[in-house]
Amino acid sequence: MTVDTAMSDTSTIQVGDTSLELPVVVGTENEHAIDIGTLRAKTGYITLDSGYGNTGSCKSSITYIDGEKGILRYRGYPIEVLAEHSTFLEVAWLLIYGELPKADELKRFEDEIKNHAMLHQDMRHHFEGFPATAHPMAVLSSMINATSCYHPEMLEMGAIDESFPSLVAKLIAKVATIAAFSHKKSVGEPQRYPDPSLGYCDNFLHGMFSRPYGRYTAEPEVVRALDQFLMLHADHEQNCSTSTVRMVGSSQANLFASMASGVCALWGPLHGGANQRCIEMLKMIRREKLDVKKVVERVKRKEFKLMGFGHRVYKSSDPRATILKQASDDLLSKLGVDDPLLPIAQELEAVARSDDYFLERNLYPNVDFYSGITLRAIGIPVEMFTVMFAIGRMPGWIAHWKEQHENPSARISRPRQVYTGATERDYTPIGQRA
Ligand code: CMC
């Protein structure tokens, strides 16, 4: 098979005796893709692309990444600019609705989120059913799905209509409450109701840390650091969990079911679960007084991966990691916190970044490498780290679900396969099997 893409808007593919002209799709940032939609019908061939490294699953106008240059933009706005000037809820609106909100739109959105932060009272019984040792990601995915039981209107939703903004607000609001409730359950403390006078991050921190005998009031630096953390996690185009949300949503599964699937996909240690694993790795190095250089040698022998390192798309730097590294330094110095894991992380980064193994493979710290230092300074327990990622990613998942739902030419996602199992065999009755 030969491919000739030349400088045209079609590309010619030669498969055996068949020459096929296929359209070339060009994105707004000059990314080129060959549309192979007719390939199987015309030639009998499919494409095979393990891990989808070369497969575009959709056209999307939400987030742009240039992995070679380390660029990340939400709806055209550079992540660095948003991280400095914007807020998580403003970015959530931007991702979902495509434009920065006007002041009254943002106010309404924030108010609606405050008003929807309470869970249905009956949902408290669900929390009682989980053991205290339950991983909060399991609780989060179950409870997001369970929430739809209390909002049957969500199950009926066909087109995106005027009820959609309210569903979005409910989802973003309740996810934070579920997360805080699951933490309280794990530490055996009574859950705290959300306080509608507080902003999104303040309210979450109140739910996490207030006790019956003492109300927690967050320092402004802590609130800002959390807000920025959530913003930096808000979207990342077609990653594993977002692709899962789109895959599940393609069957027209409801918004809440699709979000719960995203939480499950995010949980894995190669994806969002890496933030928990990264801190656990740093703790192990400290506890066992390991020599960082020897740890790196073991990584190179493939005994284990350096968690928080490497990325499918970024091949020079992950801009989120750069911002988070600075943010964790700033937060620690403002709070006067001396985290013993920070110098270990810094040494690991320095050793890895001067080593050919990592340089040849373009392996750099990703978003999960320094985010845990920030979360620890805020007081978030390590088991909750991936939940924090999920709270942040919620607007991105919603935006992709909406984009797909609004696309009149969207089809159910249904990849093909190359079958490698047994060819047709005769059935042997049970008593006659050797
Ligand atoms: N430590 C050591 N070696 C690594 C690492 C790592 N963290 N990541 C990749 N490599 C090696 C890998 O073994 C392979 O080596 P070789 O060419 O000798 O076979 C080479 O680099 C290419 O790696 P790959 O596995 O083909 O890369 P991928 O694009 O399939 O995987 C990744 C990307 C992020 C899953 C992977 O880098 C990884 O497992 N990193 C650690 C987990 C992690 O930090 N995940 C968070 C990702 S960012 C947050 C998010 O969006 O989820």
Image: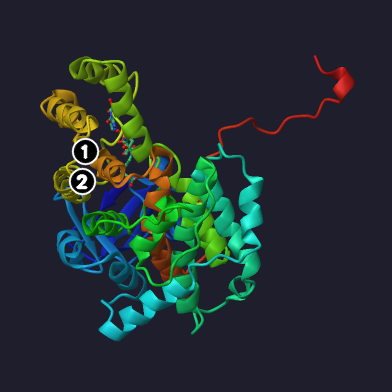
> Measuring 16% from the left and 32% from the top, which residue is drawn there?
346
Q: Are marks 1 and 2 in contact (CB under 8 Å)?
A: yes
Instruction: Tell me where residue 314 appears, x and y as whole percent.
Output: 22, 45
In depth, the one of 30 and 220 nearer the eye is: 220
Confirm whether residue 326 shows in the render: yes
Instruction: Tell me where residue 126 appears, x and y as whole percent.
Output: 64, 53
Q: What residue is disc 2 on? A: 321
Query: Which quadrant of the structure image shows residue 94?
Result: bottom left
In depth, the one of 201 and 220 nearer the eye is: 220
Q: Tell me: 161 left or right of 217.
A: right
Q: Tell me: 323 left or right of 227.
A: left
Seen in the picture, residue 250 relative to 375 is either above or below; the reply is below
> Measuring 58% from the left and 76% from the top, which residue is drawn there?
157
> Measuring 38% from the left and 38% from the top, which residue is drawn there?
382
Seen in the picture, residue 152 relative to 426 is either above or below; the reply is below
Instruction: Tell me where residue 249 appears, x and y as whole percent.
Output: 52, 62
Ligand 1 quadrant in view? top left
Seen in the picture, residue 308 relative to 29 is either above or below; the reply is above
Q: Tell me: 97 left or right of 340.
A: right
> Measuring 65% from the left and 32% from the top, which residue is drawn there?
423
Q: What mark, if any, has residue 47 been given in the picture?
A: none
- Identify the amino acid type marked 2: Ala
Q: Tell me: 351 left or right of 284.
A: left
- Identify the amino acid type marked 1: Pro
- Disc 1 crowd rating (10 Å Cα; few below 14, some 14-19, many 20+) is many
Q: CA distance from mark 1 to mark 2?
A: 6 Å
Q: What residue is disc 1 on? A: 365
Q: Secondary structure at mark 1?
A: loop
Instruction: Tell me where residue 357 appears, x and y as whole percent.
Output: 19, 24
